[in-house]
Amino acid sequence: MSEKSPKLRAELDGIPTYKPGKPAAAGGPVAFKLSSNENPYPPLPGVLESAVAAAGHFNRYPDMACTGLVNELAERFGVPVEHIATGTGSVGVAQSLIQSTAGPGDEVIYAWRSFEAYPIIVQISGATSVKVPLGEGDVHDLDAMFEAITERTRLIFVCNPNNPTGTAVRRAELER
């Protein structure tokens, strides 16, 4: 490494690189990578119209607080606007939560296997991952997750439905 290279934080050592799915073979049948959240169908007309209309305003900064969306979601679900977080997808929101709550010496609990981004974004923060094995039927073992809580626990992720197993935690189970 050159002396002019930036010095990166030690927490970043060993973070695995993202490995996207294989692209479709050239000249082969049309294929869609559903694992990459692709959709084989065109956008709905209203969505396409909204996107085209929004493109007419890309010379202005967007509302970073997503005020209209946040207010509408708060009203629809009957929650305070302060309880709604927006971001660039689930990884962006999860990373913001971790950055706001955990750092070196802290712990973040989540089921494993679960969303592949959890160990990466926890490691980036310098916190420690506490991976709780899934229970029988590939469901979250909420009792084991509860038992894993220590004075160092700062955040618990309950991926619902779980990615990649698709199992769901019901409201009564979560509230218990």
Image (cartoon, grey):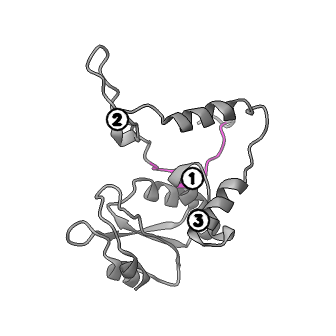
What residue lies at 42% left-to-right and 69% top-to-bottom? 158
Q: Is residue 11 above or below residue 59?
A: below
Mark-to-mark CA distance, 2 and 3: 33 Å
Dots 1 and 3: beta carbons under 8 Å? no
Q: Name the residue at the left extreme.
A: 136
Relative side of 144 to 47, left or right: left
Say which quadrant the C terminus sits in. bottom left
In the picture of the structure, the residue carrying the numbered disc 1 is 92
Q: Where is residue 154 in the image (x, y as percent from the top left)?
A: 55, 75
Question: Horizontal and vertical percent for residue 135?
Answer: 25, 72
**Dot in front, 1 or 3:** 3
Which comes sooner in the sequence, label 2 or label 3?
2
Write the residue at 55% across / 72% down. 105
Q: Is mark 3 on a helix, strand or loop?
A: helix
**Residue holding disc 3:** 76
To which residue does mark 2 refer?
Answer: 33
Q: Which amino acid does label 1 sit on?
A: Gly
Q: Which residues lie in the magenta part?
A: 5-15
Image quadrant holding the N terminus, namely top right
Disc nearest the viewer among 2 and 3: 3
Image: 147 above or below 156: below
Residue in front for this viewpoint, 10 or 97: 97
Name the foreground residue: 125 vs 11: 125
Q: Along the horizontal axis of the image, is 147 left or right of 50?
A: left
Mark 1 vs 3, N-terminal side:
3
